[in-house]
Each structure stands twice: as structure tokens, then as C-alpha cells.
């Protein structure tokens, strides 16, 4: 009787468990190399719209409604991942410049400081990934005002899967790095 009860409880528990989630990460993308005057650049912690600050991947925020995945998640907090991958993208574009995150273990006195605030990073009604971000680049010594811009970058996914969307998000983040590297290359 005990054995039967144990088997019954184990069967019910197994039926109620869900499969582990699929984990995704953004990836750095190759880009054009630029040479600038900054020897070191500090990236401030990314600002992130609250609706994106979740482990689940936001597929879309079209028509006043969020579409969020249920079994696909980010492999790390999105804000930290954005900072890590964006730093990799900048290193790819500026190989002569040391790029480090403000919250990382390594730091030095930077020549320039970059701040990014992500206001949107999901698919629109047509399925195109939209990255809307405010960017500010300033000298570390605060002698001149920051150059600030609002950028809207779009990338079309290759298909309808979450992996396709994440790949398009990686490309959009790389395009943001292209623009920021261009700003950093100016004296």
C-alpha cells in the first residue's frame, strides 16, 4: 500500500513538472574598425525600461499588449547582458581602445564615458526588432558637454522563432555600437 502511494505521488509530481526553459544570450557581431583618440572608455550600467527587466524574453509590445515567452528566457539579467555584449561590440570596432564596464572588476581613469538608456527592445507589429535608446558620450573630465542622441534602430529577424528574434536583437545592438564607436572616434 505504501509502495502504491509512493508511486502515485511520484507520478503526480512528474506530471506537474515542466520542462526546463530554453536559455538565450545576445552575441557580439563583427563591425567596421574605427580608430579614435580615446585610449580608454567606461561604459555606465545600461538603463533598461522596466517592462524588459524580466527573465522572460519580451517578443513584442505592439497594440498596447506585451507578448512574453513562457519557456524561453535570458541566460543572465538583460541589463547586464546588454552591457557585456555592447562592450564586446565596441572592442571589435575599436581594437586600440580599452573598453570596460563601470561595474566590472577592472577599471581605470577613462578618457570618455558612455551611458545608454534602452527604452524599447522588442518586435513591432510587423515583426521587426526595434531598439530605441538614448546615448550620451562625454569626456571623463567633464570639460565639454555630453553628445547625446536618441537612436531608433530596426533589424528584421530571419524567421519567426525566438532564436531569430535574439539574432536580430544582437544585430541591432551591434548597429548601436557602430554609431557609438563613430562618436568616440571624434576628438
Image (cartoon, rainbow, N blue to C red):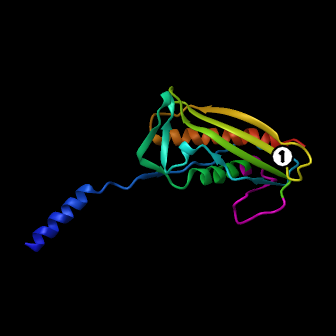
* Residue 119 x %, y %: 63, 39
Could you say which quadrant of the image residue 99 lies in?
A: bottom right
Residue 70 point in image, percent of width and height: 40, 46
Q: Which residues are magenta?
A: 91-109
Is residue 105 magenta-colored? yes
Residue farthest bottom in this picture: 2
- Is residue 32 at all visible to an observer of this figure? no
Say if 122 sits above or below 14 in the image. above
Q: Does the segment drawn in magenta span residue 86?
A: no
Left or right for 20, reference 119: left
Q: Quadrant of the N terminus?
A: bottom left
Where is residue 158 shown, x and y percent of the image?
51, 34
Identify the residue at horizontal 47%, vertical 50% (top origin): 73
- Residue drawn at the location 32% of the way across and 54% of the way down: 18
Residue 90 visible in rendering: yes
Q: Residues within 10 Å of mark 1 (few under 14, many from 20)?
A: many
- Quarter of the picture holding the C terminus: top right
Q: Main secondary structure of the magenta part?
A: loop
Question: Which residue occupies the extreme right position in the image?
Answer: 143
Identify the secondary structure beneath mark 1. Answer: strand
Left or right, 105 with reference to 54: right
Mark 1, residue position: 138
Task: Estimate the x, y position of residue 38 in percent, counting from the top left.
Answer: 86, 51
| Residue drawn at 67 percent across, 44 percent down | 30
Amino acid at each position: 500500500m505504501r509502495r502504491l502511494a509512493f508511486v502515485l505521488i511520484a507520478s503526480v509530481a512528474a506530471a506537474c513538472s515542466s520542462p526546463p526553459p530554453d536559455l538565450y544570450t545576445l552575441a557580439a557581431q563583427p563591425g567596421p574598425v574605427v580608430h579614435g583618440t580615446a585610449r580608454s572608455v567606461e561604459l555606465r550600467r545600461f538603463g533598461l525600461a522596466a517592462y524588459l527587466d524580466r527573465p522572460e524574453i519580451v517578443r513584442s509590445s505592439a497594440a498596447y499588449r506585451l507578448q512574453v515567452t513562457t519557456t524561453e528566457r535570458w541566460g543572465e539579467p538583460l541589463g547586464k547582458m546588454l552591457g557585456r555584449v555592447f562592450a564586446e561590440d565596441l572592442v571589435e570596432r575599436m581594437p586600440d581602445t580599452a573598453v570596460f564596464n563601470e561595474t566590472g572588476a577592472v577599471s581605470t581613469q577613462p578618457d570618455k564615458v558612455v551611458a545608454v538608456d534602452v527604452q524599447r527592445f522588442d518586435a513591432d507589429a510587423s515583426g521587426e526588432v526595434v531598439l530605441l535608446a538614448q546615448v550620451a558620450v562625454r569626456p571623463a573630465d567633464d570639460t565639454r558637454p555630453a553628445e547625446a542622441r536618441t537612436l531608433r534602430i530596426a533589424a528584421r529577424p530571419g524567421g519567426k522563432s525566438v532564436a531569430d528574434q535574439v539574432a536580430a536583437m544582437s544585430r541591432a545592438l551591434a548597429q548601436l555600437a557602430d554609431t557609438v564607436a563613430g562618436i568616440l572616434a571624434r576628438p
